[in-house]
Amino acid sequence: TIPTTKMTLPQVNSVPVNGTTKMETIDDMAGKWNDFKFAPIRESQVSRAMTRRYYADLDKYAESDIVIVGAGSCGLSTAYVLAKARPDLKIAIIEAGVAPGGGAWLGGQLFSAMIMRKPADAFLREIGVPYEEDGSDSNYVVVKHAALFTSTILSKVLQFPNVKLFNATTVEDLITRPDGNGGIRIAGVVTNWTLVSMHHDDQSCMDPNTINAPVIISTTGHDGPFGAFSAKRLLSMGALASLGGMRGLDMNLAEDAIVKGTREIVPGLITGGMELSEVDGANRMGPTFGAMALSGVKAAEEALRIWED
Ligand code: AHZ
């Protein structure tokens, strides 16, 4: 049997190994580098430690309760709210990139600061990210580096025992079921290693894998090489009649529209974040991230409503 993965707090190796000096803290190491030695290991132990956990996770999350597609600022905010509210639900996050975080490692262009318009400061307080008040009438707050927001929310999300992030993995199709009224409902996602998804033209025999889930939340960003994935797929399968197409930049209109519009667009599939601009024809907001966090809060609320129905 495959051992189940269980989150544990970091363990202190207080046992001396092979005659090495007992070292419980990094302070114990000071000045003792000549005698320094790691605990011995066989390479296969490393392989097994990694792969058995990954395969146990693949097994466990093949039937998930909620799948979040895309680990940008909206997807991560959604995951945080859901995992905190419902520790009993299995939440899988599928991220095409090796590095989760999407566009939230910088503010705008190459500038570090991340701006959030109020009332999204409430989300920063929720996850414990420090910020400065700014603006003549204190209408927005500033996180000194976008990476502080992204690394904090990532570390919180990844510490929830009921969340598994599958990164370097692409959702390349949706699982559908007849809804009984002539339409469809979304019942899961079709996945593949991102490198395989990028090479279907020359590696045609590499079929995908699947995850079943009654609720999918798609937050794949606006159109681009990978973006707006579910919106475009729903259009090509006829589940959406048309896409509005993201409009030009208007911060005031865009942020309200994205948060308010976050919803189940096809039975079983909720769209949030900038992917929604492609569905609804909403404006883009450029480098203000409050709507991504609060769209995540609303997506989580919608998901729990569907789940509880
Ligand atoms: O890699 C993508 C990114 O991390 C991932 N993704 C896209 N397609 C995928 C697929 N399978 C798995 N088929 C996929 N993962 O989705 C993530 C989207 O993150 P993002 O930061 O692009 O989107 P967001 O909606 O969370 O945040 C948008 C941030 C923007 S864009 C913008 C503007 O252009 O004006 N303004 C803001 C604040």
Image (cartoon, grey):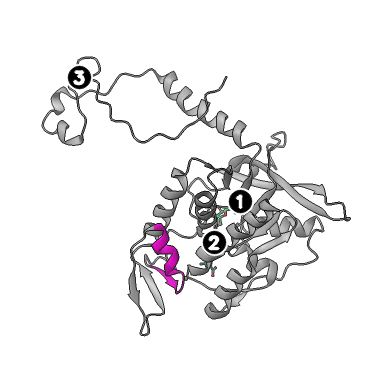
Sequence-first tag of 1 and 2 = 1
Give the amino acid at mark 1: Val
Q: Quadrant of residue 149?
A: bottom left
Residue 276 lies in the magenta stretch: no
Judge the density around disc 1: few (<14), some (14-19), many (≥20) Cα neighbours within 10 Å.
Answer: many
Q: Residue furthest top?
A: 18
The location of residue 309, given as percent across then percent down, is 71, 53
What is the quadrant of the N terminus in the image?
A: top right
Q: Is residue 301 above or below residue 14?
A: below
Three-letter code, disc 3: Thr
> Does any atom of ligand 1 lie closer than 8 Å to the CB of label 1?
yes
User: Real-space Cα distance between discs 1 and 3?
Assistant: 46 Å
Is residue 167 at least partly visible in the picture?
no
Q: Which mark is residue 297?
A: 2
What percent of the width, then of the height, locates residue 93? 57, 46
Image quadrant assignment for residue 199: top right
Q: Residue at x 69, y 34 (%)?
A: 206
Q: Which residue is mark 3?
A: 20
Q: Residue at x 28, y 30 (%)?
A: 12
Ligand 1 shows up in which quadrant of the image?
A: bottom right
Residue 194 got which mark? none
Residue situated in front as seen by the camera: 207 or 26: 26
Mark 3 element type: loop
Q: Are marks 3 and 2 in contact (CB under 8 Å)?
A: no
- What segment is highlighted magenta in the picture? 114-127
